[in-house]
Amino acid sequence: MQQRHISISSAMHNIDLAIEKGRTAPQLSPAEQKKADLANLELLISRVSDQVCSRSNSGGTLKQIKDFNALLERTATLLEGR
C-alpha cells in the first residue's frame, strides 16, 4: 500500500512539473498551434480507438463485452440445465 502512495505522489509531482513547464513554454504561432492541436487530436483518436476497437492488441472494450456476454450465456445454459 505504501508503494502505491509513493507512486501516486511521484505521478502528481510529475504532473505539477509538466504544468509548470507548460506555463513557461514560449507561445506558439496560430499555425504552429493548429498543427499541435491536430497532432494531439490524432493521438487522442488513436488511444480511444485502441481502447474500444476489437482490432487493438488488447481486444478493447468491445472484446471484453463480447467475452463477458459469452460467459453470461454459458452460465445461463448451466443454470437452465439444473
Image (tube, grey):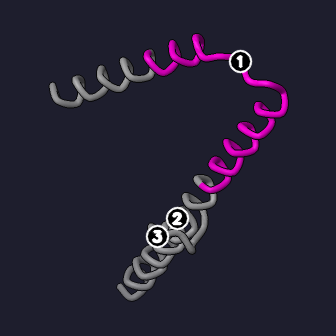
How busy is the neighbourhood of tag 1: few (under 14 within 10 Å), some, or many (20 plus)? few
Q: Nearer the viewer, residue 53 or 33?
A: 33
Q: CA distance from mark 2 to mark 1?
A: 37 Å
Q: Main secondary structure of the magenta part?
A: helix
* Residue bearing the label numbered 3: 57
Which quadrant would residue 52 be assigned to in this image?
bottom right
Q: Position of residue 60 (x, y in %)?
A: 52, 64
- Sequence-wise, which precedes: disc 2 or disc 1? 1
Q: Is residue 30 above or below residue 70?
A: above
Q: Is the Cβ of the residue at disc 3 closer than 8 Å to that at disc 2? A: no
Disc 1 secondary structure class: loop
- Residue at 60%, 67% (x, y): give it: 53
Residue 57 in the image, given as x and y percentages of width and height? 46, 70
> For the point 60% across and 17% down, which residue is it?
25
Q: Is residue 72 above or below residue 50?
A: below
Spatial separation of the CA atoms under disc 3 and disc 2: 8 Å
Q: Can you say whether 65 is above or below 81 in the image?
A: above
Which amino acid, by three-letter code, is at mark 3?
A: Asn
The span shown in magenta is: 17-46
Left or right, 24 with reference to 57: right
Q: Is residue 14 magenta?
A: no
Q: Quadrant of the C terminus?
A: bottom left
User: What residue is disc 1 on?
Assistant: 27
Q: Which mark is residue 60?
A: 2
The numbered mark, 1 or 3, whose residue comes first in the sequence reads 1
Instruction: Pick whichever, 60 or 31, lies toward us.
Output: 31
Residue at the extreme left of the image, as rendered:
2
**Which circle, 1 or 3, is nearer the viewer?**
1
